[in-house]
Image (cartoon, rainbow, N blue to C red):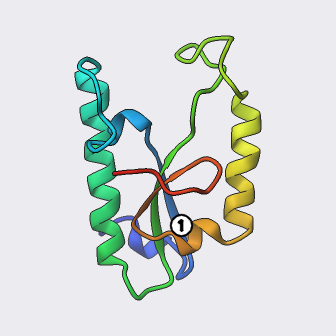
Amino acid sequence: MSKLLPLLPEDGVVLNISSWLGSIGGKSSGGHYGYAGSKALLNMMTRALGYEWSGSGRSAVALNPGWMQTDMGGAKADRTPEQTARGIFELYANGVLGRANGCFLNADGTEHAW
């Protein structure tokens, strides 16, 4: 963080793209050990950074983009990456991400279980 912080504006947002598989409370099956573990670590780092930035104007947010039409999600997924990106930008523009310091959110702005 010592390299990042001087570059981040006082009202900056660090957005970490996570996954529902990174939710320890939401894990209801085995498998995906490496991917799920890496996303759980990312979530923990986001939460810790949120505590570190508490009271400042900065925000650290983990975000579950949802099921998207990518190589990983497949053609039957709910949304395209472009649709998801537009929605995430709207969350930023509307101040939702700035107010969600230390939170795990879904792409629609609702909170996701840790």
The residue located at (32%, 47%) in the rendering is 42
Dot 1: what SS? strand
Name the spot of residue 97 as percent of width and height, x first.
Answer: 58, 65
Q: Quadrant of residue 38?
A: top left
* On screen, residue 69 above or below 86: above
Tell me what residue is drawn at x 43 percent, y 42 percent. 18
Q: Residue drawn at (26%, 54%), measured in percent from left and top?
A: 44
Question: Residue 34, can we see it?
Answer: yes
Q: Amino acid at mark 1?
A: Val
Along the horizontal axis of the image, is 85 left or right of 31? right
The residue that disc 1 covers is: 13
Find the residue positioned furthest to the bottom: 55
Vertical position of residue 18 compared to residue 49: above or below: above
Quadrant of the rendered image containing residue 79: top right
Q: Name the one closer to the observer, 13 or 109.
A: 109
How crowded pointer 1 is (Cα within 10 Å; few <14, some 14-19, many 20+) is rated as: many
